[in-house]
Amino acid sequence: MERVAILLLLSCAPVTYGLNCYYCSIESYVFDNGDYCLTPAATPNMTCPNETYCQTIVTIEDGIVTLLERSCKSPVSDADTNDEGIPTTEKCKTNIAAGSNPVQNTMCYLPCSTDYCNNQTISEFALCTSNCSYGIGGGSCDYLTGKCVCNSGHTGSNCDVEVQASALINCVQCNSETDTNCASGSIKASPCPGAETYCSTTNTTIYDDTLTVVSFVVTRGCTTNFTAEDECSFSDVVSSISTTGYKEFTCYSTCSSNGCNTNKADGLLDANEKKHLLCNQCTSDTGDCIDFNGRSPCINGEKYCYAKVNYLISEREDETYKDPAYKIQSVTRGCTSTVIPTKCVNTPVPRVSFKNVTCTESCQWDGCNTGWPARPKCITCSSNKVIGGYNRDGYDECLQNPPEATDCEFPYEQYCYIYDDGNEQGRGTSPTGYPRRITRGCSYRDVGTSCSYKTLRGHTIQTCNRTCATDGCNVGNGSKKHMISGLGVILSTVITWLMKVHM
């Protein structure tokens, strides 16, 4: 339900001329320039021409007042084009913009006919007790709560306290080309030049076609990306000089504490190179964290990765088959030292027609906290159309060799399903000339597990739905009697899962 500002109106008195009216207009509520219009006693005023009245205009967009205007108005040029008399009652008109993000815009015209009568107040707005350090970029007033909202880099009730930047990491910074002590790591660590969060050691070996080493360089420095605790790889030489026949073997090590990059990068973990669990780590309400797949180490020794999503969902739709309206509030992925339950909690929100849903899940292997927590991975495919209809018992990839189960598109899709149409009862194939089709996918609603039947030219045709809620469960046919055809997919999914667990 939208919030609607409550307007406290004065009753209209008999018409007089030459009225004194408040006069102001604001479209954004910033303390430095907006409060005078919210507080009528401090608002400028003017004497209006004859045959006019005082008026307050309020525009409300999706329950939020976005325009407040006080002025004189002539009945000849006011909003009511059907009447040229001075209005005596409030008039409102509304426009609802269609689209994926519909906006409701209502403009209300409040007339009155006594001196300074256009002093209506907006009851849901609260004034802040200070200017929120607006002049120095501290923040601005939130007129729904009467509290200051601070800009980045400021804090405090009046946004007058500057946030101190976090301390820089210290790393050994050198290269063996210019400093012979770099290889030994005996150089003192110093603050990184920017916002880097990790230290690194890199050993680069260049060799020729005869496997003779022609160059060996050690570099130590600061980096923004965690690559690996210590590992090596082969690559071509990237250089502006002639490199015909030369190849490169590079070992690189990354660490996260002050002065930690004094080690030897050789692809072998030593006492100073602690193996960390790698998890996706991000917090966002946008695609940056929804589709995030960039692993970084759990530097405090956490043993689990986790994912958490919080979203709002409403089932208030005209058609029951439509997906619900929803809005993601936040997505968080990171490291944790304890097991987080795999579950979704639905909490009704008072006074409104939607629910607040929070889903969580934890796991124990590198990069496992992708996708939506506490939701199944489903097989998604559909029978391909051919000329004249669907396949007629020819090779159907979705039926006979469906793809691996993957994460569903939306966080509310809690089921996997199969829709299977065209089987002849008891045979597992369609009658000659009858099209066969199958669809597998994700669903918010339970589409049921049952079959319906019809008779065609003496053949009993079945149409089956099957709903389930575990990873890769929508294999096989829609009929439980013919699920054996999906055994290969089940085994493939299990093997893939086992490989991930033991990587």
Image (cartoon, rainbow, N blue to C red):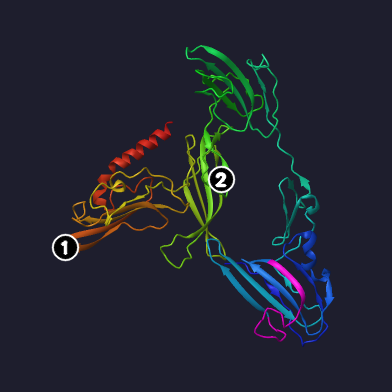
Query: Which residue matches tag 2?
Result: 288
Classify 10 Å Cα crowding around label 2: few (below 14), some (14-19), many (20 and above): few
- Foreground pick, 307 / 422: 422
Residue furthest out toward the bottom: 14
The disc at residue 68 is none
Stretch of the chain drawn in magenta: 66-89
Q: Quadrant of the N terminus?
A: bottom right
Provide the major secondary structure of the magenta segment: loop
Q: Is residue 385 above or below residue 457?
A: above
Q: CA distance from mark 1 to mark 2?
A: 55 Å
Residue 380 appearing in the image: yes
The disc at residue 457 is 1
Residue furthest out toward the left: 458
- Foreground pick, 374 / 137: 137
Q: Is residue 73 above or below residue 135?
A: below
Q: Quadrant of the C terminus?
A: top left
Q: Secondary structure at mark 1?
A: loop
Percent of width and height locating residue 73: 75, 79
Amino acid identity at mark 1: Arg
Percent of width and height locating residue 433: 20, 56
Magenta stretch encompasses residue 23? no
Q: Secondary structure at mark 2?
A: helix
Question: Between disc 1 and disc 2, whose residue precedes?
Answer: 2
Magenta stretch encompasses residue 78? yes
Which residue: 26% across, 45% down? 485
Classify 10 Å Cα crowding around label 1: few (below 14), some (14-19), many (20 and above): few
Q: Is residue 455 above or below residue 472?
A: below
Percent of width and height locating residue 164: 74, 40
Amino acid identity at mark 2: Asp
Q: Is residue 37 above or below residue 196?
A: below
Percent of width and height locating residue 194: 69, 33
